[in-house]
Amino acid sequence: MRLRSGKRKGLQLLMKSESNNDDTDDNPSRRDVISIGLASSITGVVTALGPSKAVAESMEPRAAIRPFAYRVDSTIPPTLLPLSANQERSVMSGLGKGLGTEKTAVFADKVTLNNIAQKSVFGTIDAVRTVLGIKEVEELNSGVGFASFVAMGVPKRAVDDDILLGKNLLELIMRGRSKETPMGLGLYFAPLSTQSALKTFLAGGNLLTLCDELAKAGVSMETIDLYKPILNYAKSNNLDLLAMSPEVEDVMTVRLDGLQNVNSDRRSTYVMDSEGFVQQTADPKYRLYSDRSLLKDFEPLNEDDQPGNFFAERILVHETGATALARYTCDKPDALVAFFAPMADVRFMGGTSGRLPRICKYLNPVMNKVSENFVTTVLLNPSAEETLSLSRYLRLEIGTSPKDIQYQTKVADYLWFNKMPKVNMIPRLMNG
């Protein structure tokens, strides 16, 4: 019987080794031993599978398994921390408990070295507990004046999969929420005048009737159909639906004729903190946001339309939505509010979500406990285009120039996908 060359060489080396005495220096070298194992392994594979199949399978490319969710860490520049399936559930459960999302960097905060070991992507509060003590932490994020918010940014051309992803995240949030915690669900497209129709629907009303009321108020049927699963989910889980939008005619009035021409009574409902509303537009960090994010979406309605008109329209929409959400929490300690909004209205921590801490403080100046840490922004199925990137990669920040670096702002707290994102979309990925 003839032996294959690999096996024959291996046997010769082993026989040579056995014939030599212990005092000689003729033992097989490390290279010889490796060659024996390698020859045997290759021979076994080829014998079992056949040469062509073994080579073909070894050369076949295999896509790496990538996570579906990422935390945007507040490093400079921001980096992405992948979340495992267990971490995904823990993050959402933590939001349901009102823990929010700390805005300092996970790997560069000021907690002592002993406590850093306790700190995971989703476990910031555990490290803080060790330093402050449980009682002090609980006083900071509970009771009168406390509320937490979760913004879910959907693509401009949202489809059923985007809304289903948001619904799935709501279910995870609900698992962490206490049954005693009041919870609202904000709808960016619902004018304030439809709030009574939303309450009637939740109290046992008909979905068709609600859809008719929304359509009469100027909401498109395409949008209504898209969010029907959310409306039904809110009703079946006893969530309070919250209207967030100015009336459609008022939005158009601002765009064409300016904010000053909106009905004064309705304008005072939209903008309660008028002083803060004006001052925010002069803040350097907000100016960076408006220049690098908000105004990037300007598309003229006609030849007379100007970026200033678009700016006035958007800040009214953002202020109205944030005011509606903040008012809901005023008499509901520990309230939790999740809301859907276009990605352009919540990215880079601006828009509706960026106004919530200020308005909560205005409504409750003495007892307010709502800081930016308790406003979490999640982008659902973001694309490079939606994050204003000019490449295939997602854009993670604005404010990269030397004069703006002190105001640098990350795109969101979390990026969430319902399908494995392409590898050329994910920049600055760190080990989780």
Image (tube, rainbow, N blue to C red):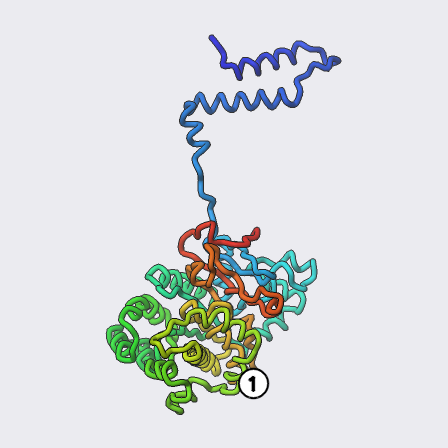
Q: Is residue 96 visible?
A: no
Residue 86 location in percent, x, y? 49, 54
**Total of numbered circles in the picture?**
1
Given residues 130 and 354, the one toward you in this image is 354
Given residues 108 and 126, the one toward you in this image is 108
Given residues 291 and 218, the one toward you in this image is 291
Given residues 230 and 188, the one toward you in this image is 188
**In the image, what residue occupies the spot 40% across and 56% down?**
418
Secondary structure beneath label 1: loop
Q: Is residue 402 visible?
A: yes
Q: Is 120 situated left or right of 243 in this image? A: right
Q: Is 8 situated left or right of 168 in this image? A: right
**In the image, what residue occupies the spot 54% across and 72% down?**
288
Height in image: 97 above or below 271? above
Residue at the top extreme? 1
Residue 239 location in percent, x, y? 39, 73
Residue 224 location in percent, x, y? 29, 70
The residue pinned by badge 1 equals 365
The 10 Å Cα crowd at callout 1, few under 14, some 14 to 19, many 20 or more, is: few
Three-letter code, disc 1? Pro
